[in-house]
Image: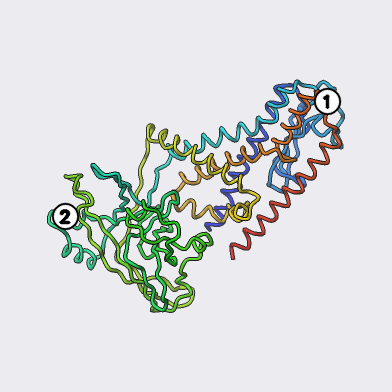
């Protein structure tokens, strides 16, 4: 059911982004009196091909929803089959070069603006969900991450025995530390050991959902420990080991599904005391709870037994000021990540991180579980900005290439031969579709 909903969501998202992009081209072309033969969403055979009475432009919906186009007179140098050539003054090449540039960049502009709007909507219209809260104690430069939790009677008894004077069991929170710039949460614990191995592990908090309460054992991943990448800042925070970077990149954590029933994972969980009536007492009381998780079940039903700690749903409405402040952080981060991603596009690492329609669809359920509709709107906004940046690349078949050709024609005052433009566009489209096919195959392989 989740994957069916994800398919519907990705169709709606891509349909919106493509429709608006092509609507940008169409609206500016109409504004400058350029004749438009067709506005199409998708490629291939037409499922719908209509135009308004006395209208000049056909509106089409085609079978392959991997893009769209606006067919404008003069764009390819030839009149499409089945159409009569309009007056030469209605050609795209008959208008001033600055007007042509506006027509070409209009789709990119609308995608970028839509991305900004969607990211703001994600902050203002929906609650934000968190894995933990961040708090900076008075007079300290260290940020503490903690998460409210409910405890089993057994854990509560342990806290009552170990609690310092002035602290109630309810005032203790689970302490998380982050690996900077990664978004990963590390459980501050002693060496994690798993029976049957001689290796040390690192425990990462990776909740399967933030939309409802979730048990610790369902939200913990174990990776082989490594000291690679450790910084002085991490050591000061108490992080003495990191996940093996190769395993982390591949997502190859210790899989409980392949462990023998009865396998145990031992670690200790750090709790911090928080006295609400005295903020300076934050971090003044620590309790280390030793845990041993045991693999239960058989076959595909194997899982870690409950730990006795259940994390609560943590959500917050940002409201107007908070939404703008978050938006001001989100937009530069999104743009920076996209530019960095495009810069590494044709490297081995960049290709491995690239996702097509299959990968995006598969990722949507996890994206939604990490923050509900706020994350879906943020994802759509990120995708829209990515589409804008990608289309600006000076690659044949993209808007950026058409802008380069227009600039050359404006500077030299000579037309680039239509045949040369057509050949380059065909080569570019073949390469782009080849890249799409390669990414799709990679995404499908990674699903299994």
Nearer the observer, 239 or 370? 239
Q: Quick one: quadrant of the C terminus?
A: bottom right
Does 340 appear above or below 251?
above
Which residue is pictured at 63% across the width and 61% down the height?
Answer: 444
Q: Which of the 4 quarters of the picture holds residue 49?
A: top right
Q: Earlier in the sequence, mark 2 or mark 1?
A: 2
* Percent position of residue 291, x then y: 30, 69
Q: Nearer the viewer, residue 442 or 52?
A: 442
Q: Nearer the viewer, residue 445 or 186?
A: 186
Relative to residue 215, is residue 392 depicted above or below? above
Q: In the drawing, does residue 425 fall left or right of residue 145? A: right
Q: Residues within 10 Å of mark 1 (few under 14, many from 20)?
A: few
Rendering quarter of residue 308: bottom left
Q: Secondary structure at mark 2?
A: loop
Residue 30 % position (x, y): 72, 25
**Residues marked 2 and 1 touching at CB (< 8 Å):** no
Question: Does residue 265 appear left or right of residue 401 in this picture?
Answer: left
What numbered label is drawn on residue 414?
1
Q: Pointer 2: what residue?
A: 167
Viewer-side residue, 90 vs 266: 266
- Give neighbour class at mark 2: few <14, some 14-19, many 20+ (Cα, 10 Å): some
Q: Position of residue 120 (x, y in %)?
A: 47, 36
Q: Residue at x 45, y 34 (%)?
A: 328
Q: Is residue 443 left or right of residue 312?
A: right
């Amino acid at each position: 059911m989740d994957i069916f909903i994800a398919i519907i969501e990705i169709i709606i998202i891509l349909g919106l982004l493509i429709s608006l992009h092509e609507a940008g081209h169409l609206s500016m072309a109409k504004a400058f009196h350029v004749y438009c033969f067709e506005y199409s969403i998708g490629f291939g055979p037409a499922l719908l091909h209509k135009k308004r009475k006395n209208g000049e432009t056909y509106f089409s919906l085609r079978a392959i929803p991997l893009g769209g186009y606006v067919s404008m007179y003069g764009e390819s140098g030839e009149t499409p089959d089945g159409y009569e050539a309009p007056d030469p003054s209605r050609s795209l090449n008959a208008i001033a070069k600055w007007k042509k540039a506006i027509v070409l960049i209009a789709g990119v502009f609308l995608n970028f603006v839509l991305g900004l709007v969607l990211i703001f909507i994600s902050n203002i219209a929906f609650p934000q969900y968190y894995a933990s809260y961040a708090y900076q104690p008075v007079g300290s430069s260290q940020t503490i991450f903690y998460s409210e939790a409910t405890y089993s009677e057994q854990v509560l008894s342990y806290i009552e025995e170990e609690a310092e004077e002035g602290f109630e069991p309810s005032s203790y929170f689970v302490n998380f530390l982050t690996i900077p710039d990664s978004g990963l949460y590390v459980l501050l614990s002693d060496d994690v050991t798993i029976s049957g191995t001689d290796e040390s592990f690192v425990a990462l908090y990776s909740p399967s959902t933030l939309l409802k309460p979730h048990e610790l054992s369902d939200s913990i991943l174990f990776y082989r420990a490594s000291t690679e990448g450790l910084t002085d800042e991490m050591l000061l925070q108490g992080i003495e080991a990191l996940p093996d970077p190769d395993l982390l990149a591949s997502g190859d954590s210790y899989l409980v599904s392949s462990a023998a029933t009865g396998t145990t994972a031992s670690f200790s969980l750090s709790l911090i005391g928080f006295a609400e009536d005295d903020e300076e007492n934050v971090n003044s009381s620590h309790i280390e709870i030793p845990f041993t998780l045991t693999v239960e079940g058989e076959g595909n039903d194997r899982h870690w037994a409950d730990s006795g700690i259940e994390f609560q749903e943590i959500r917050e409405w940002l409201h107007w000021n908070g939404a703008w402040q978050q938006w001001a952080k989100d937009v530069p981060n999104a743009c920076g990540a996209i530019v960095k991603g495009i810069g590494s596009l044709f490297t081995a690492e960049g290709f491995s991180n690239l996702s097509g329609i299959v990968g995006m669809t598969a990722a949507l359920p996890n994206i939604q579980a990490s923050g509900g509709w706020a994350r879906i709107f943020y994802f759509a906004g990120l995708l829209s900005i990515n589409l804008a940046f990608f289309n600006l690349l000076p690659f044949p078949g993209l808007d950026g290439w058409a802008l380069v050709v227009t600039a050359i024609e404006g500077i030299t005052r000579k037309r680039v031969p239509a045949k040369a433009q057509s050949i380059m566009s065909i080569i570019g489209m073949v390469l782009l579709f080849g890249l799409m096919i390669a990414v799709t195959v990679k995404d499908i392989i990674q699903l299994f």
